[in-house]
Image: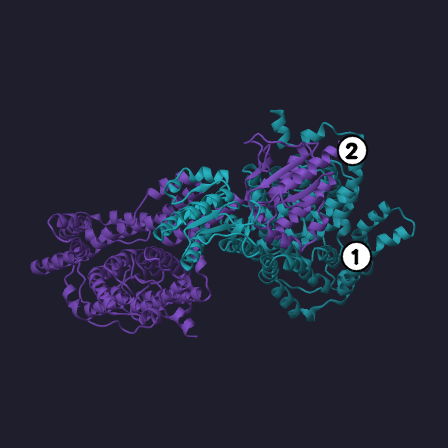
Chain colours: A cyan, B purple
């Protein structure tokens, strides 16, 4: 009973072993992550088309709920770039940015996503995430990075533009190029340049100047905060908001409010597919990070419990003014590197962010949106990685096709189309491959009991015995293929009296393949040829025994291919 | 050059060897098939919602074109029950029965289906038909038979009713029960009873009376003609059409007219999916019949050339007042049994039907539609076969689920939904199965070099060596599964120092699985455990050699599992 409870509420497990050392480490990690998260949360909320406080709210209760229900020690849950982009795409289809309906739709999306994740966790459907293949995920993340960066250019230029696909965004930017605000452009370019430099050059410089690496690392993470502070001060001191520089403006000074998602049936229907995609993509991103970090300490992640943790976090986001969240790569790595030992580090981060939401929001009134856009652009460009195109091309053309299609369709038709098409294409390519399996005609390697491809090795064969090794499970997409292959082969070659199917790589024979084998058996019998099987696996044999196939088989079932060879080529010699 | 031409125009091959014997046999077969086809063609046109002559037209040019381009010697092409039902469902969505638009949509559907079949043939996409698994086809045919029989009940009862799903049809019949025409009902019931008796009882009776079996067979095939003649005479003699008995009425006395399908873009878009489904279903029905008959004479069918033959036939149907056609089971078997030797038999049948269209149509003016409905009902009920439910249940629950879902969805939501859902479900069930592959932990069978499941056999193991045999190709749906399985297993068992993956049943390692193996290698290395592979197939090794995986592998690649055992358990002993 207690054990079951501990399994579903992991805090009960690590909580009772919590001590002073862990507390110190967790507190230290929380301070670093809080500093990093404040500008990031504001920026991702803007990317999602929501007011900046939504980003803070989405980082408070979700973190605490994940700390209670999640299994990863270091995962940091909150708004992330790709999910924010997907939220903007989904909610943009049902409501106008800036309206009350938009915010409610985002809450609803978070609750639906939470419910889907919880349901998947309870029904143990975590394996569904596997249908997102590595090439599809890699292509999707790269394309999303480009889309996100492109969508933020309007803030750097100070123009109004819109769109959820690359052609739309670029077209809209070009149409509004005349409206560029020079002061905004300067803030945007300087911030972007500064942040790139902080990311690449600051840490080595500080270390060279004698700073301890740990402190240099913290200084680097604080870079976005510095950009926020400096540009906010500049806008305030020089009154730049009067010159058309877009600023964040009034942000409520409050703890996360209690909010209600919508129960409108049409809205729920419209958001279902996006919520499903956000859940699965978010889960895949989160579990990859969690497993990478857990493996370093020989800890284990329970994928189904992770679904429950992420589901609870999203439900929390939906009821406290947030939007869909997941475990983020960057913040989790920072949390881990900063020494977080338990999910309590996350809870302390939540407290830090709550203080920020209560006390610091008036300070960001003059924060220019160009600075937030710069932090997003610098963060997401690290996601863009075209090397997957090259590596997949070298390994397998089918995988390359999946990557390329996912990238092109995501850029050209948006995130939902891109990722759906990638998944469907991967499945179709797999089915296509298995529908034309590798089939080898084999013969005996002299002096051994091994059988090898007659086209690759010098082997003994018997003109009356055709032995075929099928390198694939037999199921409906290839059932007819084998039938055609064997009949064609036998039709061309008069002296064949025995056909042996060597089944060492046949893991399944489904009902369609069984019927094809029955038809093959009858047609070969009509031609005066016997059909034999060899090396059939236990589970496959068990299933065949339930049918009449083995009774009707014109030939025999041999335990090994060598047994078949001895019996059939010997019988042949005797007959001669 | 000549050879290529002969391949694509098979008539050039068999035509030059044609002789008097073949001519006699083909002529005899043609007479029998023509007698059978006249009422059948009229009836199926009615089922498709088209005027009766459309059925005759659809049987003339298509037969000739198939004779030129098809590869089967005995296949008889024309309207068939299931395709007629699918035509009614597809065209019914875009036009009203009885309008000009309905007939044009049917022509358009035939041309689109012809174009799709031709394209599939030229692009060698015949394998696509394999994705219709046996269980799905069997379920679909059974459900279609029920739907067709139900849709014809209105003609037997003499009421007006409509619908493309079983609930719609039954509901509509019940709503119109008050309109039953008693004379029509008598004609319908007597015709149906007579035809059932002809089918089951006539032939044995005639043989018992001393008739030669061949003639008894012909008498049986002529049963529907007798029903047509008798009921038509009855309607004419007793003036029954004046008592509300629905009759065929005026049918133009003409050879097939030259007709033009529509090029309306919206219509083409609306009909594309139905045309694709009709093409694939028609192809599957046709090729199954053709292969069954060809195998009896040790002839071969070329599936891609069959697509071209059926494509030409459908184009012909679309331009000569017909509707989608395919190779029918019943008529092909009759053709074969009647001794047809070459496709010329089909051409002679076409001549017979052309004479019927020119000369006999005035004679069917008084033919009651109830008689045609009776011929359809008797024909299709032989398609209904629920035994597939029982056999698939005994063999595999996944196949049973595909059958049951296809039957229920076809009956409940119509033919297109039913067959599409069946295909999608089959694919998903397959992916689900392969996403959780059978994995066996194996050990050495004492005194041999064989390795078997430790849970099924008494085998030798070494606490430091974990050997896992994966009974499935490694690809994206199961990539993470293996990683989880191994890490979980190693995490639970302290002394493990070596993990060996035995790959004898691994036919493919895709890019996702490669990345999972790389991650597994690194994570095991972090835990101080080496990863080894054994019995990797040639094509898989070739591909792995293109990557860095084998260089980075912490362990070795062994040719056989026995080699791995010797090396690793020996190293272990030495270390001890």
User: In terms of secondary structure, where does tag 2 sit?
Assistant: helix
Crowd tier of the residue under label 1, counting other residues whose Cα lies within 10 Å: few below 14, some 14–19, many 20 or above: many
User: In terms of secondary structure, where does tag 1 sit?
Assistant: helix
- Place of residue B546 in the rendered image (x, y in percent of width and height, measured from the top left): 67, 56
Q: Nearer the viewer, residue A362 or A189?
A: A189
Q: Nearer the viewer, residue A562 or B114?
A: A562
Q: Which residue is label 2 attached to?
A: A22
Q: Earlier in the sequence, mark 1 or mark 2?
A: 2
- Place of residue B567 in the rendered image (x, y in percent of width and height, measured from the top left): 69, 39
In the image, is A230 to the left or to the right of B404? right
- Place of residue A172 in the rendered image (x, y in percent of width and height, measured from the top left): 63, 67
User: As displayed, is residue A355 above or below residue A488?
Assistant: above
In the image, is B89 to the left or to the right of A270? left
In this orientation, does residue A509 appear? no
In the image, is A270 to the left or to the right of A211? left
Quadrant for the N terminus of chain A, please: top right
In the image, is B68 to the left or to the right of A21? left
Q: Nearer the viewer, residue A234 or B376?
A: B376
Q: Which residue is label 1 attached to?
A: A195
């Amino acid at each position: 009973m207690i054990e079951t409870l501990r399994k579903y509420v992991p805090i009960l497990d690590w909580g009772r072993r919590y001590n002073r050392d862990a507390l110190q480490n967790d507190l230290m990690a929380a301070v670093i992550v809080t500093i990093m998260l404040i500008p990031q949360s504001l920026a991702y909320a803007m990317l999602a088309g929501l007011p900046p406080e939504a980003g803070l709210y989405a980082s408070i209760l979700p973190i605490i709920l994940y700390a209670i229900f999640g299994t990863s020690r270091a995962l940091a849950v909150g708004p992330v770039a790709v999910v924010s982009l997907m939220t903007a795409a989904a909610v943009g289809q049902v409501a106008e940015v800036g309206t009350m309906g938009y915010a409610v739709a985002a809450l609803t999306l978070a609750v639906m996503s939470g419910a889907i994740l919880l349901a998947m966790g309870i029904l143990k459907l975590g394996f569904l995430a596997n249908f997102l293949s590595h090439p599809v995920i890699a292509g999707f993340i790269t394309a999303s990075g480009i889309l996100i960066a492109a969508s933020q250019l309007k803030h750097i230029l100070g123009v109004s533009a819109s769109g959820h696909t690359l052609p739309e965004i670029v077209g809209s930017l070009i149409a509004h190029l005349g409206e560029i605000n020079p002061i905004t452009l300067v803030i945007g370019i300087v911030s972007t340049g500064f942040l790139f430099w902080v990311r690449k050059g600051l840490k080595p410089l500080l270390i060279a100047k004698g700073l301890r690496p740990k402190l240099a690392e913290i200084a680097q993470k604080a870079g976005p905060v510095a950009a926020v502070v400096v540009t906010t001060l500049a806008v305030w001191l020089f009154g730049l908001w009067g010159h058309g520089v877009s600023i964040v403006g009034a942000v409520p000074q409050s703890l996360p409010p209690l909010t209600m998602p919508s129960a409108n049936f049409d809205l729920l229907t419209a958001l279902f597919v996006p919520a499903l995609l956000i859940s699965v993509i978010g889960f895949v991103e989160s579990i990859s990070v969690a497993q990478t970090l857990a493996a370093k300490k020989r800890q284990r992640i329970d994928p189904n419990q992770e679904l429950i943790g992420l589901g609870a976090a999203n439900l929390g986001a939906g009821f406290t003014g947030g939007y869909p969240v997941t475990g983020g790569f960057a913040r989790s790595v920072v949390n881990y590197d900063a020494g977080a030992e338990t999910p309590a580090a996350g809870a302390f981060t939540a407290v830090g962010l709550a203080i920020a939401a209560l006390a610091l929001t008036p300070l960001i009134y003059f924060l220019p949106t160009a600075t937030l856009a710069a932090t997003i652009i610098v963060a997401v460009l690290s996601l863009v990685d075209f090397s997957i195109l090259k590596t997949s091309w070298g390994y397998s053309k089918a995988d390359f096709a999946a990557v390329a299609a996912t990238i092109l369709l995501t850029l050209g038709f948006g995130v939902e189309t891109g990722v759906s098409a990638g998944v469907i294409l991967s499945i179709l390519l797999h089915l296509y491959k298995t529908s034309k399996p590798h089939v080898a005609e084999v013969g005996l390697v002299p002096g051994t009991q091994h059988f090898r491809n007659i086209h690759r090795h010098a082997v003994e064969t018997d003109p009356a015995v055709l032995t075929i090794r099928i390198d694939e499970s037999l199921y409906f997409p290839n059932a007819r293929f084998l039938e055609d292959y064997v009949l064609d082969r036998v039709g061309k070659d008069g002296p064949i009296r025995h056909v042996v199917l060597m089944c060492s790589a046949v893991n399944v024979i489904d009902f369609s393949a069984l019927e094809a084998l029955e038809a093959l058996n009858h047609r070969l019998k009509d031609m005066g040829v016997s059909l034999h099987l060899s090396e059939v696996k236990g589970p496959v044999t068990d299933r065949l025994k339930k049918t009449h196939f083995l009774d009707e088989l014109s030939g025999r079932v041999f335990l090994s291919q060598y047994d078949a060879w001895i019996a059939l080529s010997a019988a042949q010699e005797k007959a001669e």
